[in-house]
């Protein structure tokens, strides 16, 4: 039976790819030798066709840039988180452990009028506060001493002795900060201990109180965080505004995280300035880590 052109054209793809049987190939060859139309179609199919090359590399460049940004943000997040953890660890190891024992410091007056504060070996740090005396000439001094986990167990670095009156001023009284002392009749809040000179308040005692300005910063951070959440709710349908508010909101949140890491839930502090700087050092990497985490989460949701 003679094959029609339609049958031959259906077989041509197999013929060109050399996938037809020997008998079928003979039939096709015989037909195309006598049929010009089928022969032309076979010639067109036999010519190799090159696929058009897509020269638009914009999508690839965009994907590459996105992957690079994700990698950078991941590295930043990890570094900032590690830095914050390291700062917290260092702050914990160096956190002052106040020494409530007046024997840790001895006051000695030299012949030239210089008054020395001599510290025991367990003291690694101290703070001296002074002001004009109410009774008599001169100044009243309050001494606070402490050590830390670092100075007790890792590297002992005793505090150096110091001169209370390097400019020759009169030392009227020296008190040692001790809110309580076990083993005698002193109780919490009994006041600082007079270790040299004239007692300025023999009837009521002198009390060194912790500073509370860190509490104001915490309350301000909480208020700003609440305002930020309210603004996020009001602008929830405006993506750009919401992103800006979120970046601002992360500031008080990062500060609260820093305070929680350094001070816990305790607000007063006898070393408020040191604690405040430590909180700031934790706040900065925490804020950057929060921004990086937000970017990574958004990109993950888009994927």
Image (spheres, rainbow, N blue to C red):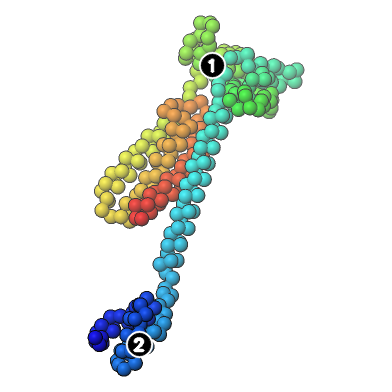
35 on left or right of 270: left
Asked if residue 58 shows in the view, the reply is yes
Residue visible at 39% across and 84% down in the picture: 46
For marks 1 and 2, give the CA distance. 112 Å
Residue 21 location, x and y as percent? Answer: 35, 77
**In front of the other: label 1 or label 2?**
2
Q: Quadrant of residue 259 in the image? A: top left
Q: Name the secondary structure under disc 1.
A: loop
Q: Quadrant of residue 103 in the image? A: top right
Residue 19 location, x and y as percent? Answer: 37, 76
The residue beneath circle 2 is 29
Residue 297 location, x and y as percent? Answer: 38, 49
Within-10-Å neighbours for mark 2: few <14, some 14–19, many 20+: some
Q: Number of numbered discs present?
A: 2
Report the front residue among 303 and 266: 303
Within-10-Å neighbours for mark 1: few <14, some 14–19, many 20+: many
Image disc number at residue 178: 1
Q: Name the secondary structure under disc 2.
A: helix
**Is 76 drawn above or below residue 97 in the view shown?**
below
């Amino acid at each position: 039976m003679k094959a029609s052109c339609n049958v031959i054209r259906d077989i041509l793809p197999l013929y060109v790819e050399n996938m037809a049987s020997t008998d079928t190939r003979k039939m096709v060859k015989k037909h195309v030798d006598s049929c010009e139309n089928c022969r032309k179609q076979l010639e067109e199919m036999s010519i190799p066709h090159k696929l058009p090359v897509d020269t638009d590399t914009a999508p690839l460049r965009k994907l590459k840039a996105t992957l690079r940004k994700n990698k950078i943000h991941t590295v930043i997040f990890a570094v900032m988180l590690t830095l914050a953890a390291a700062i917290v660890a260092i702050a914990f190891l160096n956190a002052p452990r106040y020494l409530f024992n007046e024997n840790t410091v001895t006051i000695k007056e030299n012949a030239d009028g210089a008054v020395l504060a001599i510290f025991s070996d367990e003291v690694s740090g101290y703070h001296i506060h002074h002001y004009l005396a109410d009774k008599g000439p001169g100044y009243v001094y309050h001494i606070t001493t402490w050590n830390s986990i670092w100075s007790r167990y890792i590297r002992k670095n005793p505090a150096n002795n110091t001169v209370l009156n390097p400019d020759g001023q009169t030392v009227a009284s020296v008190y040692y900060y001790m809110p309580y002392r076990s083993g005698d009749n002193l109780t919490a809040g009994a006041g600082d201990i007079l270790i040299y000179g004239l007692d300025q308040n023999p009837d009521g005692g002198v009390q060194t109180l912790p500073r509370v300005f860190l509490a104001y910063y915490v309350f301000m951070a909480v208020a700003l965080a609440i305002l930020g959440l309210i603004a996020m709710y009001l602008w929830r349908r405006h993506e750009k505004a919401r992103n800006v508010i979120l970046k601002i909101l992360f500031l008080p949140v990062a500060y609260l995280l820093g305070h929680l890491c350094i001070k816990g839930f305790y607000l007063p502090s006898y070393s408020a300035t040191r604690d405040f700087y430590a909180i700031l050092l934790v706040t900065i990497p925490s804020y950057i880590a929060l921004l990086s985490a937000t970017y990574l989460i958004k990109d993950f949701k888009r994927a």
